[in-house]
Image (cartoon, rainbow, N blue to C red):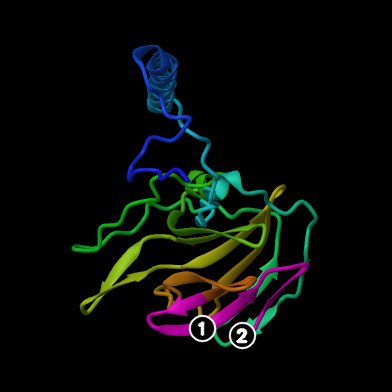
Amino acid sequence: MSIVPPFAAASWAPRSIADWAPLFVSGVVIVGLLLALAVGDSTFTAPQASVPVAREAPRAPAEARPLRAAPPRVQSGNQGSIRLVGTRALPKQNSQLASASGCSREQPGAPSSSAAAAIQAGWHVGADLYQSGYHVVLVDAGVERRGERCVPIGASVLVFIESGLVAIAYDRTGLPASRLAAIEVAEPDGVKMMGGKATLAHLALGDQLLLR
């Protein structure tokens, strides 16, 4: 019975320089492959999975959004002091725009084609909105001072579609100074006509124009 001494070399272990040579060559090959892979990793970027990022869609300028082509039905009527009438004729404002000390105002910097037509007709444009396929333009004939307030004179709201003007809403009190001083978009499809902080009327915009 032969006794194998502790830590005796296995039969496959190399016993001479000649036995070590193949292992040395294999080691050199393996190191070369690893270096090649390392260089390749430094110049290659694995494709990354694209992760959708939620972004708010940019709001197009008023002029870039399409205007309604089909003329709406206009329900003429009154809501408080505001009257709505259908018309295709853009009224001209032939007198010089009234001004008052401390009440200087500027026209919109980039008016829509509808607002530009109102300016050409002699009106001051106080607001130029796009809503539901309509251009809604607030105009007046100038401004006067009432106490500490600057009050527009003869303010009206002009409603345009693709072919031009279709309706006017105005303060029917007949007073030179109008309570109507501002307009605001009212979702989903209307415009609020404002006098100070109060809503004078709601102009509904759709297949039919009417005051509420």
Looking at the picture, does residue 125 appear above or below residue 45? below
Dot label at residue 79: 2
Residue 92 x, y percent position in the rendering: 54, 52
Residue located 40% across and 43% down the image: 4
Residue located 44% across and 35% down the image: 10
Between discs 2 and 1, the one toward the N terminus: 2
Image: magenta residue range: 193-212
Instruction: Give the residue at mark 1.
Output: 200
Residue 1 x, y percent position in the rendering: 48, 46
Left/right placement of residue 152 relative to residue 210 reads left
Residue located 40% across and 50% down the image: 108
Residue 141 x, y percent position in the rendering: 42, 60
Q: Tell whether label 1 touches label 2 (CB within 8 Å).
A: yes
Secondary structure beneath dot 1 equals strand
| Dot 2 crowding, Cα within 10 Å, few <14, some 14–19, many 20+ | some
Left/right placement of residue 37 relative to residue 89 reads left
Residue 208 forms part of the magenta stretch: yes
Looking at the picture, does residue 153 appear above or below residue 192? above
Image quadrant in which the C terminus is located: bottom right
Residue 159 x, y percent position in the rendering: 62, 61
